[in-house]
Image (cartoon, coloured by chain):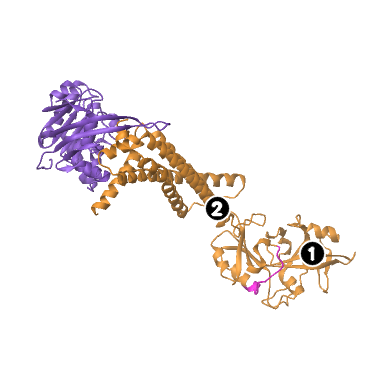
Amino acid sequence: MSSRLRQLAGIGGLGVRRVIGRLYTGGRGRTIVSITGVALAVALLVVVTSLSAGLAGGATVQSEDIDYWIVPDESGAGSVPLNAEGAQLSEVHRITAQLRTDPRVEYATPVAITPVQLRHPPTDERMYVLALGVIPETGRHVAGLNTTPLTGSYTHYDNGSYAGPWSGQLVVSPAVAADLNVTPGNELAFGGNARSSTVAHVTDTNIEASVGEVPAVVMPLAELQTLTGQTSSDAANQILVSTSAPSVKSLLSNIYPRTSVVSRAGLTGVETSTTSLPIAMALAATLVAGGIGVAFVATMMGLELTAGRQELAILGAVGFSVRARVIVVMAETITVAVLGGVLGVSLGSVGVVGLNVAIAEFVGVATLATLTPGIILYALATAVTVGVLATPYPLYLATQTDVLATLTR
Amino acid sequence: MATQHSSTPVVCSDVTRQYAGSTDRLGTSGTTVTALDSVSCEIAQGSVVGVAGPSGSGKSTLLHLLAGLDTPTAGEIQIYGTALDELSSREQTAFRRSHIGMVFQRFHLLPALTAVENVAVPLVQAGMSRSERRSRATKLLDAVGLGARHDHRPGSLSGGEQQRVAIARALAADPAVVIADEPTGELDHETGEQVLDLLTDIAADRAVVIASHDEYTLSRTDRVIKLRDGRRKS
C-alpha cells in the first residue's frame, strides 16, 4: 500500500474508530440517536421494498393457488378475465394438454369468451349472455362460476376433431336464471343455431364487472367453439393456469409470442404484476427513508460536531490539515449511516417476518413481503448514500472550526 | 529517539502580536490590543525554558506563536532556521506535525480513543501503517510509565495519567520542540512533579518550553522568560 493510500486509510479509520469509541463513552447519546434514526428509516425501506417485491413477484402463490392468465398483448391485461375482444390464442387444446403434463400445474384451461343469445323455448324469453367456454374440472371455478357440474361432459372434442357427442350442459349465473326463468334441467336454445343445452346448475354468485352484474354461462369450450365457428384454429381468448409454483410463470411466458402472463391471487385478488404500484412503493420508500435518514444524520452529526468542535481543534493542533479533518468528519458521518443501515436491515428483517405473520393472521396469505439479498444490498447502499448526502453540513462546520480560537475558548 | 538538529531550535526576533478590536454597529473600530510587544528569545537544544508572568501577560500568545498556531503581527520566529511566518497555513500545519509537540493544561485527549490510539493520532497523517503507529505509541506509553493502561480511554484515567498520555502524544512524531502550556495546572503537587520529571527527561535532545505561573514548576526549568503586559522583563 502506498504511503498516500495508507495515510488516507489511517485518517478514514480514525473517523470510524472515533464513532465506535464514542459508543463506549458518556457522549454516546447523540451517536445512538443518529444511528437509530437511520436504522428506522432503513427498516421502513426494507419492509416496504420487500412488500413491493412480494407483490411484483407474485409471492402470494406460496401458500395458495394463484391463477396465471396467458393473454394476447392486444387484449389488455386490465380486463382479465372478461375480455372478449382483440387477438386470440390458437391451438389451445393442444397447448393446454401440454401444460397439464407439467407436475407444477394443478389446473389449466383455455377460456373462450363470447356473447351469445340464449332463448328459453317454453316462454320464448331471449337474452344475450357472456358465454365462457372452458375445459371443466371438479372443484374448479372460472370467473367465480363453478365448473364442477360440467365435469364428465367434455365429450365433443375428440383428439383434434369436433366430432364427439354434444353434451349440451350449461352452468348459468343467477342473473341468467332469473331473467330467463330457468332452473336446472331446463333446456336453452342458442340464437341463430339449432343446437341447445340443458341447465346443469345455477351458481350462487354472479360475475361482477365494472358495469355491474354480467349474465354469464359456463359451458364446454369445444361446444362454444363449434357454436361460434372457432374450431378451425382451436381458438380461445385466454389460458388460465392454476399453480402454487411461481416458476411456472416463466414457462408460460414462452408459449406464445406477443402475449402477457398476468397473475392474480385468485379471481377476487388484486391484479398486481401489470401495474406500477410495486415500483412506486419502492421508490416512495427510498425517498422517505433517504429523506428521513439524511435529515437525521446531518442534524445529529452537526450537533455532534458543534459539541465536539474542540476535538477537531485538537486534531488541528497535532498537525491534521483541514483536508484530513474533513476526511475524518466524512468517515464519521458515513460510519454512522452504515451502522444505522446494518441495524436497519436487522430491524427491517424482523419487520418483514412480523408483517407476514400479521398478513397470514388477518388476510390469510402466508407470505406477502419477500426479503431478498438484493434488497439487503439495496438498503445498505441507501444507507451509504444517506451518509454521503448528509456530509455537507458537518463538513461546513468542520472547515469553519478555528483551531486556536476553539482551543483557547 | 529524537531527530538530531544542527542549529538553535527556536529563535524569536522582536515578535509582536496585536489583535484588532471588533467594530461596533456604528462602524467605530475597537481598540487594538497588543498581546506581545517586541519579544525576542533563543531557546537551545537540550534546555527547558519556562515562560512566566501573570494572566494576560502574553505567555499563551507566545506559545501559540512558537507552535505555529498563530502568526506574529511583526517580527519573526524561526524553528531550526525555518521562518514560520513565511509558511502558508497548510505548510505551518505540516511543519507543526513533524517538528512541534504540544501539551495542554486540560490534556485535550480525544475521549473516544484509547490511550494508545490517542498517542498514535499525530502519526496517522504521516502515512505510517497501523501496526507501526501502534508499536511506536506503545513504546511511548511504556516510556511515560503507562504500560498497563494502553487500552484505557481518557475517562478512566486519572489527571496525571491523562497528562502523561498527552506528553507521549506530543513525542509521537519525535519533534524538535515540545511546548507545554500550564502542564501541571490541573494536577496535584505529586502528580505535577512526575509530569515535570518527564518533561525535563525528554529535553535531553530537544527544546522544551513550559508556560506556567507556578513558582515550583518554573524552578524546575533551566531558564525563565518573564513577561508582563506583553513585554519581556528578563
**Residue A86 counted in the magenta span:** yes
Q: Which mark is residue A52?
A: 2
Give the residue type at disc 2.
Ser
Q: Secondary structure at mark 1?
A: strand
The part of the chain drawn in magenta is A82-94
Instruction: Considering the whole magenta stretch, tell me its main secondary structure.
Output: loop
Q: Quadrant of the N terminus of chain A?
A: bottom left
Task: Specify the chain shown as orange.
Answer: A
Q: Callout 2: residue from which chain?
A: A
* Chain in purple in the render: B
- Checking the image for residue A129, the label placed there is 1
- Quadrant of residue B112 within the rendered picture: top left
**Does residue B169 appear in the picture of this structure?**
no
Q: Amino acid at mark 1?
A: Val
Asked if residue B220 lies left or right of residue B18, the reply is left
- Quick check: do tags 1 and 2 share a chain? yes
Up the image or down, B125 lies above or below B67; here it is: below
* Mark 1 or mark 2, earlier in chain: 2
